[in-house]
Amino acid sequence: MENDKKILFSAIQPSGIPTIANYIGAIRNWLRLQDEYNCIYSIADLHCLTVEREPKDLREKSLELLALYIACGVDPQKTCLFMQSHVPAHAELTWILNTITYPGELSRMTQFKDKSRKHAQNVNMGLMDYPVLMASDILLYNTAVVPIGEDQKQHLELARDLAVRFNNKYGETFSVPEPIIPKVGARIMSLQDPLHKMSKSDANENGFISLSDDKDAVMRKFKRAVTDSGSEIRFAEDKPGVSNLLSIYSAFSGKSIAEAEKEFAGVGYGEFKLAVAEAVESVLSGIREKKKQLLADRAYLDGIMTEGAETARRLSGRMLSKVYRKVGLYTPKRDK
Ligand code: TYM
């Protein structure tokens, strides 16, 4: 991290096994930008506590997510990989940023409104404050860019607003981060309901393909995927199911949407869905195999996250000290 490359920060919640939507919306860009930036990737386990979780499951999913990052191609030699909860500055900066955040900004957030509806029995302060924790994640590292899917754009906007607001109030402190959102695949939809986004916590498992699904599940879920009326395979607003499948195909095959449309001209839905499934499976089979090997070596994964947390604590500690100084928290002079 001691070079002059800019910082890229991103994270995923271990709220389930990542889906192909997380892969297309975020991870693909992580891989593409790995050499261009100093990359920091966190496992956002503190974020996960905002809805009911089985503690044992959260622990297992967190480790599995680290294995998946690496299995997808994130290089632990080149990047900093850590668990959010291992780096106290994330929660500490959240407190400071809370003091410049207005409740109205948080209650307006689309995700807060959606999740409040979905978890009506448990609308807690953490659920509402979630975007401030996310802003802290990002702002602690002088982050220049944040690769994310469309659904996190509103949260990124808040991070930018808070950076500017803090800088105006206390003097230049934070960099203002830019989102990196893919042109195709920024919002992958459920295979069962193409009007709703694909989500790893969907109760209907047929709606998503997780990065751990086996070949049978991948083939079966695509076979059952909802398409639209008509028979043409073309990307269009009135064809949300087919357009979604074309986006997935484009992401996994590396072909453009136009090339894919040409390839499937005159082809039936059944054959088209099979081709999408095969393109996805050809990438997923490698990821599954690598993940299995990694999970068999727990000491290796523990080592990576321990080292990552040390680096993250060092970098974030510097920023937090600066913030504490700026806001007027007293620090005793130490004799050297
Ligand atoms: P999460 O865990 O819900 O999703 C991880 C990443 O996947 C993207 N994504 C999608 N992209 C395309 N289509 C979809 N249907 C889709 N669903 C999810 C998300 O936009 C995200 O990039 N709050 C974040 C995690 C987080 C974070 C951060 C991200 C915590 N701190 C700091 C960036 C920077 C979240 O819940 O993502």
Image (cartoon, rainbow, N blue to C red):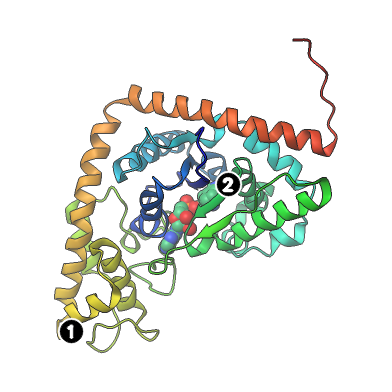
Q: In this view, does 117 lie above or below 232?
A: above
CB under 8 Å between discs 1 and 2: no
Q: What element carries label 1?
A: loop
Residue 265: which disc?
Answer: 1
Front tag of 1 and 2: 2
Task: Return the disc, 1 or 2, that comes first in the chain's sequence.
Answer: 2
> Marks 1 and 2, how far apart in space?
44 Å
| Residue denoted by label 2 | 143
- Crowding around mark 1 (Cα neighbors within 10 Å: few <14, some 14 to 19, many 20+) is few
Mark yes or no: residue 51 visible.
Answer: no
Q: In this view, does 317 lie to the left or right of 83?
A: right
Where does the image place residue 267, in percent across and percent down from the top left? 14, 82
**Residue drawn at the location 47% of the way across and 39% of the way down:** 54
Above or below, 63 relative to 216: above
Going 55% across and 29% down the picture, which residue do you hit? 86
**214 or 206: nearer the eye?**
214
Q: Where is residue 207 in the image (x, y as percent from the top left)?
A: 34, 63
Asked whether the viewer can see residue 279, the reply is yes
Residue situated furthest front in the rendering: 4
